[in-house]
Amino acid sequence: MKKELLKDLIMSARGMIKADVVIKNCKVVNVFTKEIIDGDIAIVGEQIAGVGKYDGKVEIDAEGRYAVPGFIDSHIHIESSYVSPEELGRLLVPHGTSTIIADPHEIVNVMGIKGLDYMMKAAKNTKMDIKFMLPSCVPATPFEHAGAIVNADKMEEPMTREDVLGLGEFMNFPGIINGDDEVLEKLMIAKQSGKLIDGHCPGLSGKDLTAYACAGIHDDHECSTLDEMKERLSLGMYVMLREGSACHDLRKLVKGVTPENSRRCVLCSDDIQPKHILTKGHIENDLRKCIEEGIDPITAIQMATLNAAECFRLYDRGAVAPGYLANIALLDDLKEFHVNRVWMHGQLVAEEGKYLPTYEKQDISEVKNSVHLKDFSAEKLKMHLTNNHVHVIAIQPGGVVTKKETAIIPVENGEYVFSADLDIVKVAVVERHHMTGNVACGFLKGYGIKKGAIALSIAHDSHNIIVAGVDDEEMAFAVESLQKQNGGIVLVNNKEVIECMPMPIAGLMSDQPGEWVKQKVIDIHKKAYEELGVNKEVEPVMTLCFMSLPVIPEIKLTDMGLFDVQKFSFIPVECESHTMNK
């Protein structure tokens, strides 16, 4: 800030000169004192000069609406919205979101630091502030092939960037608690830069959790029970109450929010799609749910603003107060939280759901052409079973945690014969980055598909191709169709593509508007349920794409094989306890 602007800010705060903009007749929510104050908000440049009675060069009548700080999403993967950073900003800002903390480990797992570079350049094209966490686990584990390897040496330069706040969710918690040398090197890069370290430790407890926390892990968004939440809070960690398109933990966790611990609780979406945003909203939807669960409105707003700002050391935002950034949302009420208008850095950027600024999109040529297969055919999907007693990945509706189960399946000539009565289908992961030719197969229970196949180039976190279907020919056709469109989503039936969504940005994101993506997802869901028979209790895309994530219990499939997350090792598809009758 220049000295002249600082002087104007001070003089405006005193009422000696007119502010640039004054939002008149507000009910200002003070997140420090939990009061609601009738008054005006004076803005000079990008900052708030004061709250009280002020005159401005430009005056806007809030008509008694509630003025709250711009909302902050504490943990989000932009790539999981299926749209570019600029487009996500256009979608979120009208909902009052001013800042997101993005972990781009999806695109970095595909493209390496080149993917981070693209995301940071694209982020400059939106009025929403996008801050980044540097992905910590690329690949997420050594048990899969990602598109890149980002070791400690490669982290040194990106960690120094201004908009990189720290190290992203550290999923390799066994590496931390066992003192793995390479893992410790990564932690030291963050510590030596004075930056934060995000956590990711589902199910961890006791002294193992204590060891994880003492390594400097700052927060966790993977709590699924109140006991897990309480234990993390007791160790000084922030807990993120997650409400996204795939995981819905907020309602059960918010029951653990108390006056004593609320300031260590923040809100996040993790993964959220345009359909969710355009129909339900973003953080304001979380606030509605908090109120429904008995949290008072200002405590809920604190979790969405001041708590998050302090969590990530963003001390210039998170409150409507003197000297803070003029990131302000006007709300009609504190129950439904309808957003009337939004200011970012002192500029009016949204009104009644419409994003006002014009913007350009970052060139995507550096992150296209990301699907590379070697010698793939239906033959690669054959399993040559000698046993009809197999391990299965059992989907649990409403989340991404799976159960490790076993089943007796029909087998002919060493291959599974699909039976709709069993609700078990073959699932495969096909390596798409380095042309290794790797294909691993397993069995998926609870997905429900009864015809055709579904293939995605979104398969957390290494983002190989994942495909599920009723037979090898349908699955192979889906994979080959996906390669032709250079990634995205493909639904097939009788060797015909019945729906698809190309995603040219690293095979993870569309280059189309959010409304187009929303309609595509609706069409994909409709055909997945109605034509292919997918279980209506599961989200057909986001559920499938998490079946390859080998850090979420209990069992997953990578391009290298079937992985037992609790044992943190591969297991055979076939069980030893039952042999086929010959």
Image (spheres, rainbow, N blue to C red):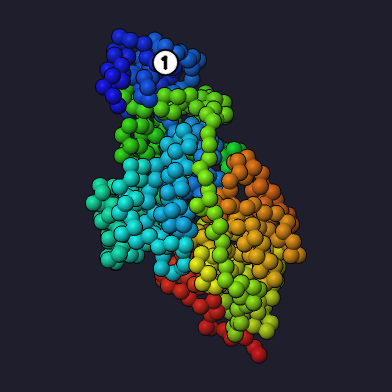
Picture layout, residue 97 above or below residue 191: above
Residue 133 image position (x, y, % from top left): 38, 48
Name the residue: 51% across, 78% down: 572
Drawn side of residue 123 relative to residue 11, left or right? right
- In the structure shown, which secondary structural element does the residue marked by tag 1 occupy? strand
Drawn side of residue 241 relative to residue 375, left or right? left
Residue 127 image position (x, y, % from top left): 46, 33
Q: Which residue is mark 1?
A: 22
Q: How many marks?
A: 1
Q: Residue furthest left?
A: 192
Instruction: In this rendered view, identify the residue nearer to me: 438 or 569.
Output: 438
* Quarter of the image where one finds residue 566: bottom left
Name the residue: 56% across, 57% down: 369
Instruction: In this rendered view, identify the residue nearer to me: 373 or 342.
Output: 373
Name the residue: 64% across, 48% down: 521
Name the residue: 40% across, 12% down: 56
Q: Residues within 10 Å of mark 1 (few under 14, many from 20)?
A: many
Q: Is residue 100 visible?
A: no
